[in-house]
Amino acid sequence: MDSSLLVDLSRSQFALTALYHWLFVPLTLGLSFIIAIMETIYVKTNDPQWKKLTKFWMTLFGINFAIGLATGIIMEFEFGTNWSNYSWIVGDIFGAPLAIEGLMAFFMESTFFAIMFFGWNKVSKKTHLLSTWLVAIGSNLSALWILVANGWMQFPVGMQFNPDTARFEMKNFFDVLFSPVAISKFLHTISSGYVMGSLFVVGISSWYLLKKRDVIFAKRSIIVASSFGLLVSLFLISTGDEAAHQVALKQPTKLAAMEGLYDGARREGIVAFGILNNKRKIGEKGKDEFLFSFKVPYALSFLAYHNVNSFVAGADDLVYGNKKYGIEPASAKIAKGKKAVNFLRAYKDAKKNQNLQKAKSSLKEFRIYEKYLGYGYLNNPKEIIPPVAITFYSFHIMVGLGTWFLALFLLLLYFSMVGKVEKQRLLLWLGVFTVPLGYLAGEVGWIVAEVGRQPWAIQGLLPTKLATSQLDSSAVGITIALFVIIFTVLLIAELKIMFTQIKIGPKES
Amino acid sequence: MFEKLSYLTLQEYWWVIVALLGALFSFIIFVQGGQTILNKIAKGEDEKDIIIASLGRKWELSFTTLVMFGGALFAAFPLFYAVSFSGAYFAWMAILFCFIIQAVSYEYRKKPNNFLGQKTYEMFLFINGGIGIILIGVALGTLFTGGNFIVNDMHQSHWTTATRGLEAVLNPFNVVLGLTLFFLSRAQASLYFLHNIDHKNIQKRIKAQLRNDAILFVAFFLVLVAMLFALSGVGYGANGFFVQKHKFLLNFLANPILLVLFLVGTLSVLYALFIALFKNSRNGIWFSGVGTVLVVFSILCLLGFNNTAIYPSLADINSSLTIQNSSGSFYNLTTMSYVSLLVPIVLGYIIFVWRVMDRDNITSDEIKSDTHKY
């Protein structure tokens, strides 16, 4: 089970399928609301132009939605097929949000999708509009539950380890649902989807304006999408701030990697941009962290803990400990974790041999070290730090792009309001080329969240290497190859269909 | 309310929900059945478009029901999910791929510049309805016939055969179950089309198709029931697990309500086939739908009750899974039971949308005037 090749392949397969799935989800989340807003305007004004607008974006939504659905089912299967230990050890908590997602969200989405697409002549305008809104709400409810589950992986709450069943069991559903990490993660993720939806509409509409076709259609689309985009970008930035604050409180190792911070300090500045010094490794004090960097003074202390004087721990502090700031060395946690593992084994053996006294004393000892259980499976204190370079660069690309999106929406809205948007050719080209950057921002955001959580599947409790199924590496290798082939084929098909529909435009759709 | 129930009652309640979802899935896979007879009952593009439109407004329900079935199993019986999905790795992956290709095929099939061509997407639909459904039947069969796994005292599991679940296709019971499900889905597809489509030529061909599929379905179903009653199962008691001859027949006799549901369901399906073939009725789908749900529900319930293993281990009988040793915790099942109260609401809006969308039958004219079509 602790075969590093199997773990690497299992992680690769999950990363591949999750990142691929995330190419389609943000657009579903964002575009569904933009379409609902457009249809609302149509129902209010009765202007057929707005119906044409709604139907065109709905066509593109449908193309994206189909492949999003196709890739979504993979995640659910993979928890069982490739992460069976995970499924048992935390399934009691993780499974519930997943099932609720199916019941509350998937059925709503898939049922009202039929009316949204095929019900124009079968139901009243208002019922149709309601169905469109319900598809949007269903999509976003789906995001809620899966992000509650993911939030719990980042900050496990509301559960207790049961040594008899050898798993974590839920003790408080509302602690899981209303965990601050889950809430901030949900809000940040859905707002990134809304931004993506807005960028998509703005980008395609900009292209129409550059080509001097469908001008009124494109201008109206830009007004709706840039207004929506501007609002949700502000929301995205504020939820990002809260998400980072939660990371600082709950996952300091992730924060250290996000900032490339090895030596912690008070009044720490934030790196606006920088190039990491690859030679700086954990424990090699004295070497510079960056070859080049520009820092905003005090900002990291302030943003992380809302106090400019606060101490921000670096990777070295977290690995080797820092007495002054009460940080326990990782080696001490690992030693306690190994005691927890041994006492758990002793408890299980004593139970099997019906030695009740020994079982009782082992359990008592286990409870003392229980919270370090996950550390008992680590071998080296340095393991607690996630890969720094990929986390650092992903985080900074995401933040930089998020700031650019805000500026883009602001400029487009301004020029739309003053009636000069079609003359801003550079801005319109920027609008077109920002669409792929929106996808990039979403993908690197997930890399920060998931690579930054390593070495844990469940933060502090379950190392990733312990969570896999007992499979032959070759079996996972075969399925990775199959996924790569099918994903490539389907992506080519999706892009060709999408580009063709965009070229056809709203007139014929 | 639910917290006053015993742990065992909650485990049974959740098995009933899983069985109900499995039963509903067995009905809604008429979509898959329809995909496999597309080229037999439709000649020419217009007719194909009619069939695809009829199925296309329902396919997501079948997809979602499968996802929900998996989700409920994961949440309520996580050990089953962990053991079966990882153990029978290749079998589940094959099923997964059959459903990935379905999800894009309706939308992309006739879109201009779709890269793979219309025929490929129609082949995807055929694979989904054929191999996909037969393999799901085979996988369901393993709940009765067992799998080659061992579970240790930390509840970590491993599979003992290198073929990773593909060996299940060598078991005759599993295969017969798969084929029964396959022909049932096709027969129900014909019943659904009879009800849903107004088109003379298609109606004629549906009748001929239904006759063939109905005969094969009834034949496989009879064999399946005979095999089920003859099958040994794994029971458990205070002294552990043991093999019990005619376990499922005994379970039926111990649960007369399940036997009644099974008989009523069977008669209802047979009645549906009879009125469609010999009385020119177009309402067979409702009788066969209700009948299918009752039959599959009663058969799946046989596993969860009367101290029966829901997943026997062929490698080590003591590793066998039951609703008791594989379930979520008492707290988790209680919490999810409250969530399950939403089921009637979900069923309510599904019925509402179904009625709205199927108020008028599908005709050539409607398909031609439709602004969004598959």
Image (cartoon, coloured by chain):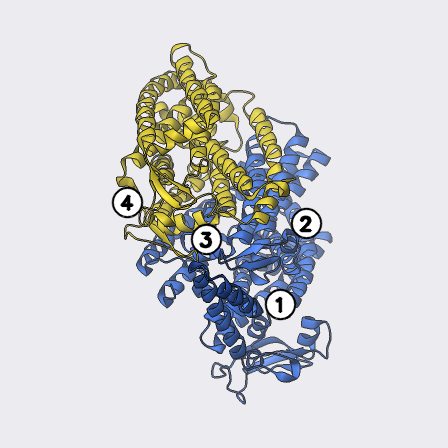
Residue identified by numbered label 4 = B167
- Residue under the point 68% across and 82% down: A266
Q: Nearer the viewer, residue A413 or A420?
A: A413
Placement of the N terminus of chain A among the 4 image quadrants: bottom left
Comes first in the chain, label 1 or label 2? 2
1 or 4: mark nearer the eye: 4
Residue A79 numbered tag: 3
Query: Measured from the top left, where is residue A305 in percent x and y?
Result: 70, 72
Residue B46 visible in the displayed image? yes
Residue identified by numbered label 1 = A250
Q: CA distance from mark 1 to mark 2?
A: 40 Å
Could you say whether the residue bearing mark 4 is in a helix, strand or loop?
A: helix
Which color has been applied to chain B in this rendered view? yellow
Q: The residue marked by circle 1 belongs to what chain?
A: A
- Amino acid found under the numbered disc labelled 1: Lys
Check disc 4: other Cα within 10 Å, few if <14, some if 14-19, many if 20+.
Answer: some
3 or 4: mark nearer the eye: 4
Chain coloured blue in this rendering: A
Q: Are marks 3 and 4 in contact (CB under 8 Å)?
A: no
1 or 2: mark nearer the eye: 1
Could you say whether the residue bearing mark 1 is in a helix, strand or loop?
A: helix
4 or 2: mark nearer the eye: 4
Q: The residue marked by circle 2 belongs to what chain?
A: A
